[in-house]
Amino acid sequence: MKPKFFVTTPIYYVNGAPHIGHAYTNVAADVMARFKRLDGHHVFFLTGTDEHGQKVEKAAAEAGMAALTYVDGISARFRDLTTLLGLSNDDFIRTTEARHIRSCQELWRRVAAAGDIYLGHYEGWYAVRDEAFYGEDELRVMPDGSRIAPTGVPVEWVREPSYFFKLSEWSERLLAFYEEHPDFLAPVSTRNEVISFVKGGMHDLSVSRTSFKWGIPVPDDAAHVMYVWFDALTNYLTATGFPDERAERAGFWPPDLHMVGKEITRFHCVYWPAFLLSAGLRPPKRVFANGWMTVDGQKMGKSMGNAIDPWALVARYGLDPLRFFLMREIPFGQDGDFSPRALVQRLNGELANELGNLAQRSLSLVARHCEGRMPSRGAATEDDATLLALAEALPLRLRTALGRQAMGEALEATWQVVRAANAYIDRQAPWTLAKTDRARMAAVLRVLADVLRALATVLQPFMPGSMARMLDQLGVAPDQRDLADLANPVPDATVLPAPSPVFPRFVDEDRGAD
Ligand code: MSP
């Protein structure tokens, strides 16, 4: 039986249109899902929308719409985003669905039965934009006396009856859990932040609200709706069919990887494992926090008014160049600026010139001088063997890098081989061999075809559409495109389709090519 792999994105708030920041985490999670499938896993890839809470309720009111109508509309746009980005998600969850309401209420009952929930009274600061509670000591006081959360958003004073989760009693157990599971949280900077937050001592957490209605009712006390983060985090459990232990996807629990933005690690790494452990359920194996995509150094977001529209980018540059750029440009885990100019440089340089030309040059020679059929291997020279060895090492190098979500490192390892192959083709000059030594020319072209196949195979998770086209041109059968299939060479004399460039150069109509 194939090993299982369960990977998730955050579920997105439906308070505004999707932007490129959302696309960033989506693409990263999709790369992980696709790579694991390629590497022989049975994958469950989940994404969806977070539809309850005050923030969404407020956005609906501002749009002058009933909450449910409003969330239906925006959730559909996030679903469209998955199509736009070519995501391979297996499910799309909405927190307004009946399956989710049932699952949240059951988790609540279990946590309550464990003695971790009590009724009290909350009085303190709340930031609707973050859907988070803050202590007085965390806030900045402004000259007019108002207060600002560490994230820069306003807070308001909330005073109401509330159920609490006994988070204050969980510090020791959480610290022990982090200690026993060193891979639970990455990158290391985020890990250190979370640990020091827990070490600093924690207050009990308010997990219900009474001052508004847009949420999941607390079991047996309909005056309360659940705190939106209790509701939201539970989506991961719902999607496995919880509480039905015989559900088709029950065996995927616990998640192998939650991909999240760094601003929501506290929820995923402190509250979430505490809720689950309290209910007697296993916590996720790993949470990876990506950095922020910034515009002129500021986090991109709808409230910042600097959001970039993914639809416009895909229309202008194409999907795969965008996916490649997102994973290549910014070291995954760190913040980085989004710049269309840098995207065009990567597209024209690495994709069109380096990889695209390599394929086009090699395959045109095959078409012209080998009757369009896959040439046979000859006796390998040292130069051949060195390049082939580099290509053969790729699956392992990618497995290692992506095992740590080092997306950029995986692409850098791949590009080392692209560059080595370009140097090889220039050294071997098969266009000259065509006139002097046809047997050697054929052997060189076969080496190049095999190296291109390895490259296209490992790059599929990043650029699925373009790499499928490249594998078609290389005569690789559709059922021969997993990592393990690299052991089966394309049969000699396979008829290849006429080559055509996979990555056209981008020419800016106003400025000429960058
Ligand atoms: N609804 C919560 C998450 C609940 S998960 C159980 C939420 N939603 S959100 O709509 O604000 O989306 C947050 C996620 O979108 C971030 O954690 C991150 O993954 C992604 N990003 C949103 N803006 C981003 C950037 N500017 N840069 C990088 N990622 C960004 O929080």
Image (spheres, rainbow, N blue to C red):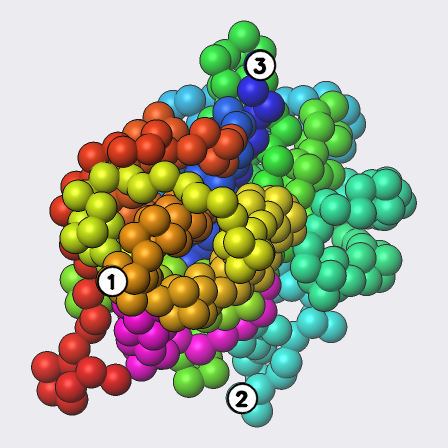
Residue identified by numbered label 1: 435
Instruction: First in sequence, mark 2 or 1: give its number.
Output: 2
The extreme bottom residue here reads 143
Q: Secondary structure at mark 3?
A: loop
Amino acid at circle 3 = Met
Q: Tell me if 51 is positioned left or right of 162 in this view.
A: left
Q: Residue 177 location in percent, x, y?
A: 83, 41
Establish if 47 lies above or below 347: above
Q: Residue furthest front?
A: 436
Name the amino acid type tagged 1. Lys
| Helix, strand or loop for the magenta stretch, by majority | helix
Mark 3 = which residue? 1
State the separation of the CA atoms marked 2 and 3: 63 Å
Cα distance, mark 3 to mark 1?
52 Å
Whole-Å distance between the Cαs marked 2 and 1? Answer: 82 Å
- Which quadrant, please, contains the N terminus? top right
**Which residue is drawn at the image coordinates 68% and 55% (left, top)?**
186
Q: Say if disc 3 is inside 8 Å of ligand 1.
A: no
- SS at mark 2? loop
Q: Of 333 and 407, which appears nearest the observer?
A: 407
- Tell me what residue is drawn at x 69 percent, y 34 percent: 283
Question: Do the residues bearing badges 3 and 1 touch, measured as CB atoms within 8 Å?
Answer: no
Residue 12 location, x and y as percent?
Answer: 41, 49
Span highlighted in magenta in the image: 333-354
Q: Is residue 414 left or right of residue 286?
A: left
At a point 44% along the width and 44% down the height, the residue shown is 378
Instruction: Tell me residue 479's x, y (percent).
Output: 35, 26
Dot 2 corresponds to which residue?
Answer: 144
Is the distance from the Cβ of mark 2 to the nearest ligand 1 atom less than 8 Å?
no
Name the one closer to the observer, 500 or 197. 500
